[in-house]
Image (spheres, helix red, strand yellow):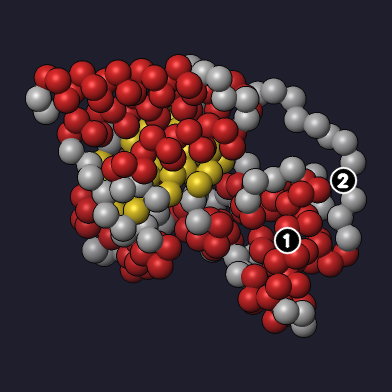
Amino acid sequence: MPPQTYRRSLEHTLDFIRDLDRARNLEDICTKVMGYLSRFGVEHMVAATIPTPDSNRREQLGHLLLNRWPDEWASRYAARRYVAHDATIRRLMTSPEPFLWNELEPLVQDDPIARRVMNEATEFNLNMGFTLSLQTLDKQLVLFSVGGRHLEMSPDTQGMLTLVANYAIGRAIMLKQETPSNKPIMLSAREREALQWAAEGKADWEIGAVMKISEHGADKHMRAARTKLGAINRTQAVAEAIRRGLIA
């Protein structure tokens, strides 16, 4: 990268970091991070502490820090416990070095379920990706992954992305440690049912079918539940409902 181009990129990154310091909630962090990363072709992003392979859906969703992963894919991944076969997780547990997803072929060639995980991810525009890990002061390993149909991930870009991930995850951990409100939330029976099916990985049209209502009706129940739970998306709504014991 030419010196002038690198300097402009560095100045832009420093501006981003200063802006990130002003974030007041996790959604704000997600918006700022995605705004910065979109220039590299990034369409989705997730940051999470790493659950154990035998963790259940509730435990897995509780590990999320930042989430701009496709809702349906996140729900399916948790419901089918793909964490036990995810090649990105296996790679992180054996090496601290960042990697592109196209480097994972040796880990999936003899594991049909791992291959299925990667193939199904492409249904949600997660054709290419980049993953890195960070370790917190209390020795927790944090995964940070970005994905999209076409990524521009030069070595310089990967270095900047590592810097961004460090600051974004640090800010997210600070905000997450703030005590959440435990004010009672009342969901209707239909809202709880819609959330329960969402937790099983079903899309709105499938939820409508099993509840014998239209897809629009299912979406209406999901939107109402998200509003009551203060959630920004389906995955967060499911995680919060599970945390509060509103669904199993």
- Kindly report which numbered mark, 2 or 1, lies closer to the viewer in this rendering: 1
* Secondary element at image label 2: loop
Q: Is residue 144 above or below residue 123?
A: above
Instruction: Report x, y in % for residue 190.
Output: 84, 67
The location of residue 181, given as percent across then percent down, is 80, 32
Q: Amino acid at mark 1?
A: Met
Residue at image point 24% right, 34% down: 157
Q: Is residue 209 left or right of residue 40?
A: right
Front residue of 27/96: it is 27
Which sits in the foreground, 225 or 15?
A: 15
**Residue at horizontal 70 percent and vertical 81 percent from the top:** 209
Residue at point 88% right, 64% down?
189
Circle 2 Cα neighbour tier, 10 Å, few/some/many (<14 / 14–19 / ≥20): few
Q: Label 1 belongs to which residue?
A: 222
Q: CA distance from mark 2 to mark 1?
A: 15 Å
Quarter of the picture holding the C terminus: bottom right
Asked if disc 2 and disc 1 are in contact, CB closer than 8 Å, the reply is: no
Residue 8: image quadrant is top left
Pointer 1: residues within 10 angstroms few (<14), some, or many (20+)? many
Amino acid carrying label 2: it is Ile
Farthest left residue? 2
Helix, strand or loop at mark 1: helix
Q: Is residue 153 above or below residue 150?
A: above
Residue 49 visible in the shown view? no
Q: Residue at x 82, y 52 (%)?
A: 246
In the rendered structure, find residue 148 and report the number of the disc placed on it.
Answer: none
The answer to whether residue 194 of the structure is visible from this angle is yes
Residue on which disc 2 sits: 185
Q: Is residue 242 left or right of residue 5?
A: right
Q: Quadrant of the N terminus?
A: top left
Q: Position of residue 129 (x, y in %)?
A: 31, 49
Q: Does label 2 or label 1 sit earlier along the sequence?
A: 2
